[in-house]
Amino acid sequence: MAQLNINGRTHNVDVEPDTPLLWVIREHVGLTGTKFGCGVAQCGACSVHLNGEVVRSCSIPLSAVKAGDKITTIEGLSRDSSHPVQKAWAAIDVPQCGYCQSGQIMAAAALLAKKPKPTDKDIDEAMTNICRCGTYHRIRAAVHMAAGNTKVGSADATLSDKTTV
Amino acid sequence: MDMNNKILSELPKISRRKFLVGTAAAGGGLALGFSLPFGIAPAAAQSGAAAAEVNIWVVVQPDDTCVIRIARAEMGQGTLTGLAQLVAEELECDWKKVKTEQITAGQNLARKRAWGDMSTAGSRGIRTSQDYVRRGGAAARMMLMQAAANEWNVPVGDLTVANGMINHAGSGRKTSYGKVAAAAAKLTPPDPKAIKLKDAKDWKIAGKPLRRLDTADKLNGQKIYGIDLKMPDMLHATVKACPVFGGKLASYDESKVLGMPGVKRVIKVNDSTVAVVADTWWRAKKAIDALPIVWDEGPNAKVNSASIAEHLKSGLTGSDAFADIDTGDAPKAIAAAAKKIEAVYSVPFTSHTTMEPMNCTVKLSPDKSEIWIPTQNAEASLAALSSASGQPLDKCEVYKMDLGGGFGRRIGNQDVVRQGVAIAKAFPGQPVKMVWSREEDQAHDFYRPIAQCRLSAGVDENGNLAGLHLRVSGQSINAFANPAAIKDGKDRRQLQGLWPQPNDAQIGYTHANLRTEYAMRNTHLPVGPWRGVNTNQNGIFLECFMDEVARLANKDPLEFRRTLMSERPKHLGVLNAAAEKAGWGKPLPKGVHRGIAQFMGYGSYSAAVAEVSVSPKGEVKVHRCVFALDCGNVVNPDQVAAQIEGSVAYGMTALHSEISVDNGRVVETNFHNFRVMKIAEMPKVEVVLALTHDFWGGVGEPTICVVVPAILNAIHAATGKPVRSLPLSKQGLTLV
């Protein structure tokens, strides 16, 4: 029986120690906002925060999670989608299919926690999650918006402003 | 495609005009929204019996919430929001009170396909349903206003409506949609033919860059995709199919895994596929990885990319090609020209790689077969469910889950349905969720077809084109998926974008000596539609070669194209618009070069200008892409921009990566060797919507076919060497 602190709540899980944290979260704790994309730590759909660091939960066995580790999933990022990253994502309609966005948002939130005013280069280095719909353009704009680098409605922030009809 | 044919033969056929009349009448009798047997209750079902179904598209709740029904699939492309905007525009409701609800394939069947075609592919979601959904919204508005007129005993012509509030200026009376909806639902619907739709210039909701309706749940983990479903007593399955296409399952030793934690059964799914069913997916996955499986790899076990390339090469010169366009005598004109050029291009297979792996949840009960599935065609899924489960169509139901990516993977072949049903048959009455691993998803796709193209051209002493001859050799989607679509042995679909006929995917150039040909060369890989389908490779072939010919002619690529486009004003319109927006001909920073391309697909006209630099080490940086799109009319310009941005990322991955074959199987089995482009490689994207307003074209697919040729032409400008063979990674070039 392992004890996990997820989003501030304690969960007791009785599961094989080699089970990846992703599947513990999805199948045993029942939080499905964290997604399965590749299983080999390449795509980032499974990104969660482990003691504030963004990690790829598909490749962390339960046995590597220590008692007292604090895990935050997308469901625990904010109570009401009020995290600046979530607000920026909403303001410029970042998601298309949305499947990778939990991971993207967790990666962006971790980046901003470390670097409140990230440069484009910081974003390139920190945001390595895969999106097949191709929302990268808006993710970059939304990270800058969440950082307060741009404001809602500014030309840099709102993609439709760049669209000429 | 076999399933599409089946569905067409099995489902009642109703013309677009008839269904509005027929179902509006049915709607008049059904004064309440039916409750839906979803795991997730839609808006109208939640509201209970008090919600009034004014017609099939519009359900109004007492609190004035307008629930707009959506038949097409939402896979990120924004169709759900766009269709709601079109209905709401004519409905004159309050956009802030709009909710949407998805219909099921079973409901559509039970009501004689009242909602029309549910399939969502070919960039058709909006353009082929815009007329009837707008009429649906208008009919509901007219009925709601008539109900108010009846209540007040005044002529309906004296009423006005705005934001779902009906006003009678003469008496100062006001009412809301929610208050009159129940009465409206009992009225005889208007003749759809008599409905006059608004002119697009008067739109207030449609045509505007409104925020999507489906974003909130994607930001907090609350959205339930097919892979996220939870049901009581649900079991979890995963599969392995023979890695060599055409191979079979010889044997497996289930005794080695039946004792593993949570494992319930090992099941032979079909001749080439085995499944493990367990109490969690991870336990099923671990067990199938431990399962000793012996494959009979069959006759294709020695096939590799080199042997496939040789096979295609034979089509470049073989005598079995057919000519589609054959104007004048292109070979003769080229032979006699002052200067000539010949080139062979090749484009590899590639995979869809949706972020949500293939999955479905199936529950087979004695009197009902049910499936929850992310599908681009719920009706094809219904037909497949019926055929696989043996239950008649009216005892089957498909609950369409929003897709974690589609791109064509989840439209035609319902392989996932057949597998899911075969597994669930072992557990009657119990839901079984099957989820593929990423490795299975990569290795068992329906790939974008592989193709080569031989092109030759001549120019005269003045630099004018003397003739152009193009022959595509490659795999046919129709031969694999829908042989009946091939007429007289000529598979014209593989020449998509090069067709002479207008309106859909017409070639942008005319010339006195022009010849286009196709030679079919199939492989053992299954192929299918992939965002943009055959416009992808054909756009590369024609538009990259056009730059080579322009160089031979010592002409600017833009100017050279223009000389061939006088009979193609819409193609020329977007070409000019992209060039102007990009500042074609103006100075660029040192080391940055431009490339241009135009092409047509899905009823829309696209052009792009790419700005690229190439380092001495072969690092390709795409700085900026400027697009012009003429899709006729636009419902949500911000979402059109989003689709164009997305087409850049999807196109650039296909530029850089490939699906290759060794020992009969796919080599690129996960993201470690199938490199998908990331944010660092994403260029700036700018969009011009150069709309001509007299038609409705597609949006999701049309621009992808100009992404790659514009970039390749810019690389050519930067390096002086054409890139004729993809992927870039095998040409010593890499995206950075």
Image (tube, rainbow, N blue to C red):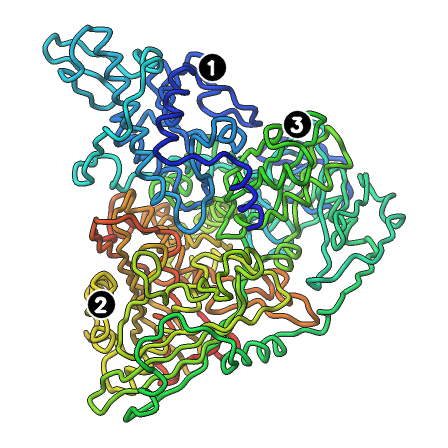
Look at mark 3 in the image and give the residue it sits on: B368
Q: Is residue B423 above or below residue B552?
A: above
Look at mark 2 in the image and give the residue it sits on: B579
Q: In which chain is the residue bearing label 2?
A: B
- Nearer the observer: mark 2 or 3; the answer is 3
The residue that appears at 78% across and 37% down in the rendered structure is: B426
Could you give the CA–CA distance between mark 1 and mark 3, rounded to whole angstroms? 24 Å
Considering the numbered disc 3 on the image, is that residue within a helix, a strand or a loop? Answer: strand
Crowdedness near tag 2: few (<14), some (14–19) or many (≥20) residues, C-alpha within 10 Å: many
Q: Are marks 2 and 3 in contact (CB under 8 Å)?
A: no
Q: In this orientation, does residue B191 appear? A: yes
Does label 2 or label 3 sit earlier along the sequence? 3
The residue that appears at 78% across and 43% down in the rendered structure is: A16
Tell me where residue B603 appears, x and y as whole percent: 33, 54
The amino acid type, in three-letter code, at marker 2 is Ala
The front one of B455 and B394 is B394
Look at mark 1 in the image and give the residue it sits on: B48
Crowdedness near tag 3: few (<14), some (14–19) or many (≥20) residues, C-alpha within 10 Å: some
Could you give the CA–CA distance between mark 1 and mark 2, rounded to whole angstroms? 55 Å
Q: Are marks 1 and 2 in contact (CB under 8 Å)?
A: no
Quadrant housing the N terminus of chain A = top right
Crowdedness near tag 1: few (<14), some (14–19) or many (≥20) residues, C-alpha within 10 Å: some
The amino acid type, in three-letter code, at marker 3 is Lys
